[in-house]
Image: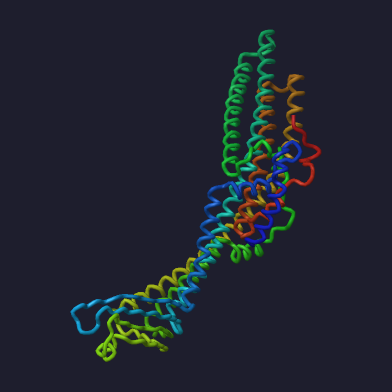
Amino acid sequence: MDIHRNAILIKTTLLLLPGCLLSTSVCALSLQESLIAANSYNAEMKAARSLHAAVQQKKYQGFAGLLPVVTLQGGWNKTDQPDATYSAGVTRHNYSVNLTQPIIDVAKYASWRKSLVISNAADVKLLLSQQKLISDVTTAFYNVDYQRSVLQTNQRILTAFAARLKQVQKALALGDSTRLDEDEAQANYDTAVADKLSSENDLDDAYIAFHQLTGLDAEGIPDKSLSCVSVKVPLKTEQIARDAVSNNLDVLAAIQTQKGSEVDIISSSSNYLPVVTFQASYGKNWNRAEYANFLDSLFGTTSKTDNTVVGVNVSIPIFSGGSQISQSIEAAHRFEESKDLVTEARRKAAQQALQAVSGVKSSQSRIKAYERAIISARKRLSSTQYGREIGQRTLIDEFNAEKDYYQAIQQLAQARNNLIQSIVKLKSATGALDYAAMESFNCREPFIINRDITYE
């Protein structure tokens, strides 16, 4: 994933987003627009970007340790000895320009390398925050449509069972039905009322969750958005596993941790190595007595000198109680730990990717199966209604057929929602979950489930 590519995409979409938000009746809210809005609205994402910008300064701070240090020093003081025969009212002035340049300093080199690792780790951490936001917004976006379908299905069930209850009550009054049929119809109606209330609450929760992430009104999400998502490319498990091992963000984070441990070994080794520093300075000193005499000139009370110093300072560590040896051993063990954690992260990434592939394939198969199940359930309901008219089926049989029909509709919606979640998990496992990748989730043409499927 490329942070700069995503930034360009965000800026482009932001130019188009206000017009869509001001005319929701013309421009329905898409997943891409929701993600862009969340990127600028979500406080957690803002905090992640601020932290990333702050940590990026570490690499400049580390590199500064390799550059020369230039200082300017100066001083002025006055000494007064009224009873002395000389050095009375002496004013002293001095200034110097000093330069220090490390020539061989492994500790500063290690600090610079460490700062680069910290900066790269911050990049990965920002991408992880971005990936989490995309996953959360995608889940919330499609959960709204899913909960709508649940509510619509429960409303249809309630309408159907309310009509059946009235029919049974009229038939019972005429003596054409039994108390058992009325009890069955009443029980189904009461259950449908409870299911409708529960689905209304779930839909409200979905609206709140979406608004919390994006700051947008979920009313703009178009219906049947679940049906826009499909997998058109073949899923090659071996290639997907390789992508996960190479591009998974948790793997990249573990690799940066390993690089940091490697730098720690260099840093601990610097305790044994000499430090060579180039030093240079230039300055002037002059003294002046208010009542200068021969003694002031003789002893230097009144004088002016130039100072130029050029040299190389070498510091060689000899012994400091053995702490350096302990630090080196510690760094070596931590490096081995980081290598094992990278291996574990790669294995987990491959496992997550393969599980996501399995989830995608399973959801695709279930969608096809439930599409056929809806057709079969609709035919069964029609046959049961006809059978009841001719006396070969009971009212309970008709209730069961209706339940199976609406349950198949609900299971299809759930399978579509599961497909989306599996795709998100797959993209996350392979490190491909970014703003550009979510463009494929948008509807591009009117949705048709199946020409043989109708919802009543």
| Camera-side residue of 329 and 176 | 329
Total labels: the figure holds 0
At a point 66% along the width and 27% down the height, the residue shown is 155
Q: Where 175 falls versus 39 (above or below)?
A: above
Q: Is residue 273 visible?
A: no
Viewer-side residue, 238 vs 207:
207
Residue closer to the observer: 128 or 397: 128
Query: Could you tell me residue 55's position as x and y percent?
Result: 50, 62
Query: Which residue does the image show at 67% across and 60% down from the upper left?
Result: 5
Q: Quadrant of residue 312?
A: bottom left
Outermost residue on the right side: it is 451
Locate the N terminus by quadrant.
bottom right
- Name the residue: 24% across, 89% down: 295
Quadrant for the C terminus in the image: top right
Tell me: 52 left or right of 417.
left
Q: Is residue 37 left or right of residue 310?
A: right
* Residue 444, above or below 87: above
Question: Which quarter of the figure has residue 453?
Answer: top right
x, y percentage for residue 21?
69, 41
Q: Residue furthest left?
A: 83
- In the image, residue 348 above or below residue 279: above
Percent of width and height locating residue 88 = 24, 80
Q: Position of residue 395 (x, y in %)?
A: 68, 21
Look at the image and tell me whether residue 443 can be seen: yes
| Residue occupying the far top of the picture | 174
Residue at point 57%, 59% (across, down): 351
